[in-house]
Amino acid sequence: MTRDWITVFEALRSVYIEGAYSNIAINEAAEHHKGCSVGFVRAFTKGVIRDSIQLDWFIDKLAKKGIKSIKRKTLIILRMGIYAVNKLDSVPDHAAVNSSVNLAKKVSRGSEGFVNGMLRDYLRRKDTLFADIDGNIALMYSFPQKLVDMISEQYGEEAECILKALSEPAPLVIRANTVKTGREELIEVLQTTGINAYADDESRNGIICEGGSIISSEAFRNGLFSVQSLSSILAIEALDPQAGERILDMCAAPGGKSCAMAELMQDKGEITACDIYEHRLELIKASADRLGLKSIETRLLDGTEHCAEFENSFDRVLADVPCSGLGVIQGKPEIKLKEDSFDFKELENIQAGILKNAISYTVPGGIIEYSTCTINREENEMLVNRVLEECSLVQILEMKTLLPYNNKVGFFYCIMKKSH
């Protein structure tokens, strides 16, 4: 059994049993098992989580007493084994079975015979099991039926294309820090380190990357770029912050959008980056320090609570609100497994409160951007329109939903102007 498999198991155990976020769980497991193949571990772990609903359906069909009879650790091993057979081209079927059995001996002693039998049965019945789910898009793309129904209702015939896109790994996109370097110059630097990097034509500073360990690169340590989704980059470019302006980022942590605005302003102006947790403000400060940005100041503030001091004070206000995150399931597949991801009403009340405050904080003639990383129209177009029905001071300049195609994640933004 390789170090990689035990690392993946530990990351998955943290996600499934302890409710951890996948990125944090993977990083902690990789740190605990130094020398593991981090890229393989990340792809394997995310893939198992991404396919969990489908994998569990297969396991339920294979187990004589059903999936509920299987202990949690053993269930994780079975998910890993079946996923390896289905998706890991670098792992032959016999190796997937053997690695799963060896893992069971290590972490779920006594279950190795059961694991061996289940996986060998799966190899025999795989084609039939896949035929049984053909046409069932919830199982084909491993999504909760509730979410499939919602996306189908909102997007009609495009729903299956959206689900398919969300079930595939997200592309790696970075944002060139133009305070320190040019985009083309950065691309040349990355390519010399074995990273296939090329400019994204839709954005001013976005770069698509393939291969290589981007975060461990010297260019990252020197603050030449940040990892940020293309959709998020495009949303900040649409806000178009200008040098010398006073800007408020109401829900700023971990700081990617604040830093992106500072870079577009060539670090000239004032950006107030707010969050409700002190430790998350430290993340913003760390990002700004790494990037060499001086125009960002942090402030502990709850965006849902009105701050009289901020009334009519900012040239541009960004309200990138807490949301269901349904547009970024590619990178955070655990969202599909959490029931509270679909509690939209509570979220909508928070979102509406933040947007109302954002409008009040903007100077007359100033610009407001409301954004989310979800494709749920109840949190997006419908919410903006509902809030603006109560506010005649604001007109919509641009409203856009970015679907998870062409190197993007699902995202929504609305640019508004406050009247004089």
Image (spheres, rainbow, N blue to C red):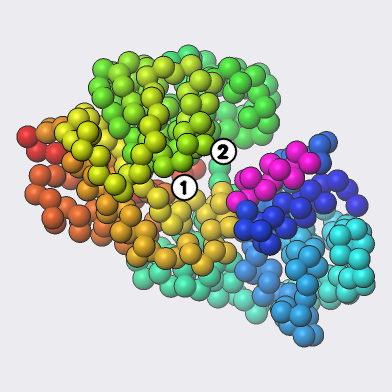
Residue 197: x %, y % from top left: 57, 28
Q: Which of 286 and 137 is in front in this view?
A: 286
Residue 332: x %, y % from top left: 56, 51
Element at label 2: strand
Query: Would residue 405 be seen by someone viewing this image from the given angle?
Result: no
Amino acid at dot 2: Leu
Q: Residue at x 71, y 79 (%)?
A: 68
Residue assigned mark 1: 409
Q: Which residue is drawn at 47% across and 69% down?
A: 148
For the record, the magenta segment spans 21-32
Dominant SS of magenta comes to helix
Residue assigned mark 2: 172
Of the 4 image quadrants, the one containing the C terminus is top left
Q: For the residue carrying disc 2, how many other residues have a C-alpha within 10 Å: few (<14), some (14-19), or many (20+)?
A: some
Above or below for 49 versus 412: below
Q: For residue 368, which numbered disc appears in the image?
A: none
Q: Nearer the viewer, residue 170 or 334?
A: 334
Q: For the residue carrying disc 1, how many other residues have a C-alpha within 10 Å: few (<14), some (14-19), or many (20+)?
A: many
Residue 99 is one of the magenta-drawn residues: no
Residue 56: x %, y % from top left: 68, 72
